[in-house]
Image (cartoon, coloured by chain):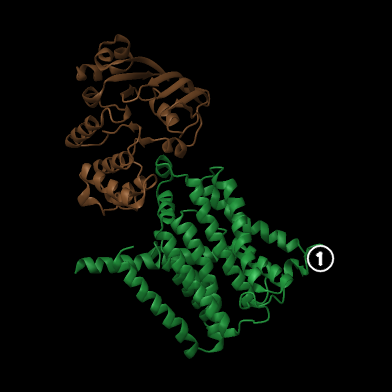
C-alpha cells in the first residue's frame, strides 16, 4: 500500500535520507527506529507531504504522491501524529476532534464519532477544556483521538509514547493492540520497551539509509544494528 | 453558539437598535456627522478584526481595500449615476484584488511575517500610484482619477436602482449604523459556521489543519477575500459620506490607525474592533476641541498605557475580569 523508491532528501549537500526503498503491506504495524539524525523524521515528513523529496518516488495506495501537499495526502486516508502534539490550542478538546471528523462526515455523524472517540480515549470529562491548557500526556491522547476519529487507512505516529506516564504508555499500547489489523501503522519510536511490546517488523534507519528490516528479535540479534544504534538500548531491551 | 449566547446576542441587537434610533433624538448635527464616519470606519476595523483576529492573517495594509472600494464606488457611481452599481463595485473589486494578492502569497506559502510586510506595502504602492495618476490620461469613462487631489463631487447613496432618490443626512447615518450592525452579525454567523471554525483552526495550527485534510491556503484566501469585500463596502460608504475621495486613504498613517483600533479593542474578538475604533475616534475628536492638550501626545501616552496595562485589548481584559468575578462568586 505504501512504497518508496530510491528516496533522497538533501539539505545543503548533506543527505538526510539517501536512497530509501521501503514498502509496507496493508494491515501491518511497522516500527521505524534509528539514532538521532538517522533520517527517520525526514523520511516521515516526506511521507506526510511536509517535506518534498529531492529525488525518488513515493507511491501510496497505488498512486504517485511524490511532492503532494499534506492535505492531499491526508485526504487519501492518512492520519499523522507529529512528534510534538499539534493541536488547535484555543479550541476545546471536543472541537479539536469534531473538526477532524467533520471533514469527512455529516454533522450528526461527526458528533457521534467525536463522542465515541472521547469515550475511547477517556477524555469525556475534559470535552470542553481548551486543549492549550492540557497536560502533555492528555495532549498526545487528543491528537491520537483526532487522527483515529476519521478511521484512516494508514496511521503515521511519530514518537507516540514520548512524554507519557507509564500508565498512559500502557493505554497507548492497548489502543494500538485494539486497532491492529483494522488499519496500517508506521510508528517512529525511541522507547525500546514500547517497540518491543508492539512491533512485528522493524525498519532500522542509519545515516539516511535502511540498515536492516526484520522482526524485533532479528533486529535485536543483528550485530550491525547493535553497533550502529542499539548499544545500550539493545542490552536494556533484552 | 449555545442558547445563552443566542439570548445575549438578541438582547445586544435590540439594545444596539434602540441606541441607533435614539441617538439622533438627542444629538446635534455635528455629532451625528461624526458618528456616521465612526460607524463606517468601524466596519473597516471589523474587517481587519476578522482577517487578523479570526484568520490570523496579519493584514497590516487592510486599509488598501477600503481605498480601492472607495475609488471603485466613486468611479462607477459617477459614470453610471446609480450608487447601486457603485456599492457593488466597491465590494467586488477589492475582493478580486484580494484573490489576486492572496493567491500569490498564500499559495506561494509566504509566511505570516513576510505577508504582513507585503500587505503593508500594498497601500503604499497604491498611494504613489494614485498620487502620480493626474492629468487627462488618467480618465475612466467620465471620471478623472485626479492624482493628489482625488475625485471630488462623489454622489451620495441612493435607494437601490432608483437614481435621484439620494439619502438624506440622517439617512446616511442610519445606513452606516445599520450596516455596522449587519456586518457585525454577519461576522458572528461566519465565526460559528463550519467555514469560520475551520478558519480559526487554521489560525491555531496550520500544519494540523493540513494534516487533517483541510487546504489551509483556500481557507486563508476565503477569509482574506471576505475581509477585503467588507473593507471595500466601508470604503463606498466613506466616499458617499465625504462626497469626495483622495489618496489619503492609502497613507501609512491611516493603515496604522486601523491596526491600532483593532489592537486596542482586542484582537480575536468582534466587539473589540468596534469599541477600539469608536473610542479612539471619539477621543481624537474631543481632544481636537480641547486646546490645553496636544491630541497627538495625549493619544500616544494613552496607547502606551494601554499596551502596558491591557496588552490583550479592552474587550478581552473586561471579559477576563468578568469571568474571574463570576467564578469568584
How many residues crowd mark 1 within 10 Å: few (<14), some (14–19), many (20+)? Answer: few
- Drawn side of residue A8 relative to residue B119, left or right: left
Residue in the foreground of this view, choosing between B303 and A217 = A217
The kind of secondary structure element at disc 1 is: loop
Residue at the far left in the pictured view: A167
Rendered position, B311 above or below B39: above
Give the chain letter for green.
B
* Residue sticking out furthest to the top: A223
Quarter of the figure that contains the C terminus of chain A: top left
Q: Is residue B151 left or right of residue A125?
A: right
Q: Residue at x 56, y 88 (%)?
A: B29
Residue B305 appearing in the image: no
Q: Is residue A99 above or below residue A156?
A: below
Vertical placement of B320 versus B18: above or below?
A: above
Chain A, colour shown: brown
**Would residue B192 be found to the left or right of residue A144 on screen?**
right
Say which quarter of the image contains residue B97. bottom right
Amino acid at each position: 500500500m505504501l512504497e518508496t523508491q530510491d528516496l533522497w532528501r538533501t539539505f545543503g549537500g548533506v543527505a538526510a535520507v539517501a536512497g530509501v526503498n521501503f514498502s509496507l503491506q496493508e494491515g501491518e504495524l511497522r516500527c521505524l527506529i534509528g539514532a538521532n539524525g538517522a533520517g527517520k523524521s525526514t523520511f516521515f515528513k516526506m511521507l506526510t507531504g511536509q517535506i518534498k523529496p529531492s529525488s525518488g518516488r513515493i507511491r501510496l495506495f497505488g498512486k504517485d504522491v511524490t511532492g503532494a501537499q499534506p492535505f492531499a495526502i491526508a485526504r487519501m486516508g492518512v492520519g499523522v501524529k507529529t512528534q510534538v502534539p499539534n493541536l488547535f490550542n484555543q479550541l476545546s478538546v471536543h472541537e479539536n476532534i469534531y473538526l477532524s471528523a467533520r471533514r469527512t462526515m455529516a454533522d450528526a455523524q461527526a458528533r457521534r464519532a467525536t463522542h465515541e472517540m472521547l469515550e475511547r480515549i477517556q477524555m469525556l470529562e475534559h470535552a470542553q477544556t481548551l486543549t492549550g491548557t492540557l497536560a502533555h500526556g492528555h495532549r498526545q491522547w487528543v491528537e491520537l483521538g483526532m487522527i483515529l476519529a476519521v478511521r484512516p487507512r494508514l496511521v503515521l505516529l511519530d514518537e507516540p509514547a514520548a512524554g507519557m506516564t507509564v500508565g498512559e504508555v500502557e493505554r497507548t499500547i492497548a489502543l494500538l493492540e485494539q486497532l491492529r489489523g483494522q488499519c496500517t501503522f508506521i510508528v517512529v519510536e525511541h522507547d525500546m520497551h514500547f517497540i518491543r511490546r508492539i512491533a512485528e517488523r522493524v525498519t532500522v534507519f542509519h545515516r539516511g539509509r535502511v540498515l536492516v528490516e526484520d522482526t524485533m528479535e532479528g533486529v535485536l540479534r543483528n550485530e550491525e544494528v547493535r553497533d550502529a544504534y542499539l548499544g545500550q538500548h539493545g542490552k536494556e531491551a533484552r | 453558539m449555545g442558547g445563552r449566547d443566542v439570548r445575549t446576542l438578541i438582547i445586544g441587537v435590540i439594545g444596539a437598535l434602540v441606541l441607533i434610533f435614539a441617538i439622533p433624538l438627542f444629538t446635534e448635527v455635528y455629532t451625528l456627522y461624526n458618528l456616521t464616519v465612526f460607524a463606517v470606519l468601524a466596519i473597516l476595523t471589523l474587517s481587519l478584526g476578522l482577517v487578523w483576529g479570526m484568520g490570523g492573517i496579519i493584514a497590516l495594509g487592510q486599509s488598501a481595500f477600503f481605498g480601492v472600494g472607495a475609488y471603485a464606488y466613486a468611479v462607477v457611481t459617477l459614470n453610471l449615476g446609480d450608487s447601486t452599481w457603485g456599492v457593488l463595485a466597491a465590494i467586488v473589486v477589492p475582493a478580486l484584488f484580494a484573490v489576486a494578492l492572496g493567491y500569490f502569497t498564500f499559495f506561494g506559502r509566504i509566511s505570516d511575517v513576510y505577508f504582513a510586510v507585503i500587505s503593508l506595502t500594498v497601500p503604499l504602492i497604491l498611494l504613489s500610484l494614485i498620487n502620480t495618476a493626474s492629468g487627462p490620461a488618467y480618465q475612466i469613462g467620465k471620471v478623472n482619477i485626479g492624482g493628489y487631489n482625488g475625485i471630488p463631487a462623489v454622489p451620495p447613496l441612493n435607494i437601490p436602482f432608483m437614481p435621484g432618490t439620494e439619502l438624506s443626512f440622517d439617512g446616511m447615518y442610519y445606513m452606516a449604523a445599520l450596516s455596522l450592525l449587519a456586518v457585525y452579525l454577519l461576522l458572528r454567523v461566519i465565526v460559528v459556521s463550519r467555514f469560520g471554525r475551520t478558519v480559526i483552526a487554521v489560525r491555531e495550527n496550520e500544519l494540523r489543519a493540513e494534516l487533517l485534510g483541510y487546504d489551509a491556503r483556500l481557507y486563508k484566501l476565503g477569509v482574506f477575500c471576505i475581509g477585503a469585500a467588507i473593507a471595500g463596502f466601508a470604503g463606498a460608504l466613506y466616499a458617499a459620506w465625504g462626497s469626495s475621495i483622495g489618496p489619503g486613504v492609502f497613507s501609512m498613517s491611516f493603515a496604522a490607525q486601523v491596526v491600532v483600533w483593532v489592537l486596542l479593542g482586542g484582537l480575536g474578538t468582534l466587539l473589540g474592533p468596534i469599541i477600539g475604533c469608536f473610542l479612539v475616534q471619539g477621543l481624537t475628536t474631543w481632544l481636537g476641541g480641547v486646546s490645553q492638550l496636544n491630541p497627538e501626545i495625549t493619544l500616544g501616552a494613552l496607547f502606551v498605557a494601554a499596551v502596558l496595562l491591557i496588552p490583550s485589548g479592552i474587550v478581552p481584559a473586561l471579559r477576563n475580569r468578568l469571568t474571574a468575578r463570576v467564578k469568584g462568586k
